[in-house]
Image (cartoon, grey):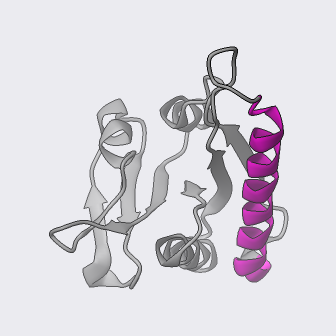
């Protein structure tokens, strides 16, 4: 089973990584890490150039990928990690389809109704290329919101 783990800071991101480690250890899942660097537009109408800002943000998100691999422990050795640039046509749904992943683990964020959600979950589910699992901050059977293909 090929599993893509979306890396984000916070408790939801940590829970998704812990779930990925379990899948690697128990189900021999092949993991891939991906993080998306937010991108600020730059141009003549936007004031100062955002080039330096975008470079620092990308560097910070790349550090998140390194920390994620370390959190995976032995399961993280040799795991590929990809940094997507959020403003230059990088599309998570296309990345999932191109990588032929069976499952995508998304870090959950608490909504008003207290269930774990992620803004990309519905778009990925509609794309229908992989099983989308939103892992809540308190990862456990009751805290995993599964969204089918």
Q: Is residue 145 left or right of residue 34?
A: left
Which quarter of the rendered picture does the N terminus lie within? bottom right
Query: Magenta segment: does it hold 92?
Result: no
Decide if residue 100 is on the left or right side of residue 130.
right
Q: Which residue is located at x 62 percent, y 69 percent?
A: 28
Q: Tell me, yes or no, whether the highlighted magenta stretch contains residue 53.
A: yes
Which quarter of the figure has residue 101? top right
Locate residue 53, reporting x and y percent: 76, 43
- Start-end of magenta stretch: 49-74
Quadrant (top left, top right, bottom left, bottom right) of the C terminus: top left
Q: Whole-percent x and y of residue 27?
A: 55, 72
Apparent side of residue 99 relative to residue 83 in the rendered image (left or right):
left
For this orientation, the residue located farthest to the top is 44
Q: Is residue 89 above or below residue 24?
A: above
Decide: is 103 above or below 55: below
Q: Residue at x 25, y 82 (%)?
A: 142
- Give the main secondary structure of the magenta stretch: helix
| Residue 47 screen position, x and y as percent | 68, 26
Q: Quadrant of residue 123?
A: top left
**Number of numbered discs present?**
0
Which is nearer the eye, 46 or 97? 46
Q: Residue at x 37, y 74 (%)?
A: 136
Front residue of 138/31: it is: 138
């Amino acid at each position: 089973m090929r599993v893509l783990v979306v890396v984000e800071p916070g408790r939801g991101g940590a829970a998704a990584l812990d779930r990925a480690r379990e899948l690697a250890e128990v189900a021999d899942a092949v993991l891939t890490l991906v993080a998306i660097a937010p991108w600020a537009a730059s141009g003549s109408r936007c004031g100062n150039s955002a080039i330096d800002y975008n470079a620092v943000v990308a560097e910070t998100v790349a550090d998140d990928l390194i920390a994620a691999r370390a959190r995976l422990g032995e399961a993280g050795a040799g795991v590929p990690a990809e940094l997507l640039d959020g403003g230059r046509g990088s599309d998570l749904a296309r990345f999932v389809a191109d990588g032929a992943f069976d499952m995508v683990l998304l870090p959950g964020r608490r909504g008003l109704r207290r269930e774990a959600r992620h803004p990309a979950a519905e778009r990925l589910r509609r794309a229908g290329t992989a099983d989308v699992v939103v892992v809540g901050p308190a990862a456990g059977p009751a805290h995993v919101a599964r969204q089918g293909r």
